[in-house]
Amino acid sequence: MAASRARLGETPLPDLIDGPRDHSSLSRGSALIEIIVLGVFIGVVLLTAIGAAARVLEAGSRASDAAEMAATAMALGSGDDRARALAAAIAPDAESVSITEVGGNFAVIVTIRVGLIGPDGGPVSSIVTGRAIAAPSPHVSSSG
């Protein structure tokens, strides 16, 4: 009699208790979870890279602005201390401000170290520099 039931297309008893043995829905669910985890990981990496690039660009702009302001101050006859104070006001996190006179012109280099990873930069950093050269103003007396 059991053979006649199977022959008539009825489902065998173990399949009625455990359900059909189709594993495709399980694999689709785990694939979806893998895709979500991978997407989150890629998103975090991209956001970190974009944040680092933004910090480098912003620091480079500040370094250039500070160097231009300090070179202009030197060209207008301000002293070395005043030019360094102006550079420090624009780029307070500057690692160094170098002012030299080259061929009668004033060259200023401002260096800033920028952290790249994490909210505070972390141990990985990049160095950006801003450079400017200004000729002494003809309207400023050199006799002091």
Image (cartoon, rainbow, N blue to C red):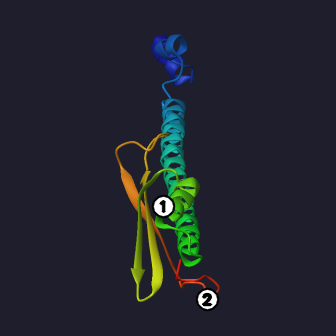
Q: CA distance from mark 1 to mark 2?
A: 21 Å
Residue nearest the observer in this picture, 25 or 121? 121
Image position of 41 with respect to 16: above or below? below
Residue 92 pos. (x, y %) = 52, 51
Residue 25 lies, in percent from the top left, at 54, 31
Along the line of sight, the residue nearer the viewer: 73 or 20: 73
Name the foreground residue: 130 vs 96: 96
Pinpoint residue 57: horizontal percent, then vertical percent: 54, 62
Q: Which residue type carries mark 2?
A: Pro
* Secondary element at tag 1: helix
The residue at 46%/72% (across/down) is 108
The quadrant in which residue 65 appears is bottom right
> Which three-letter amino acid code belongs to the residue tagged 1?
Asp
**Residue to which mark 2 is pinned:** 138
The foreground one among 21 and 114 is 114
Q: Position of residue 45 (x, y in %)?
A: 48, 47
Residue 122 vertical position relative to residue 68 in the rendered view, above or below: above
Tell me what residue is drawn at x 61 percent, y 82 percent.
Answer: 140
Residue 81 tag number: 1
Q: Could you tell me how many numbered marks the image carries?
A: 2
Name the residue furthest right: 139
Q: Residue at x 53, y 40 (%)?
A: 40
Q: Earlier in the sequence, mark 1 or mark 2?
A: 1
Please give the name of the residue rendered at 58% of the width and 71% of the height, measured from the top-left corner.
73
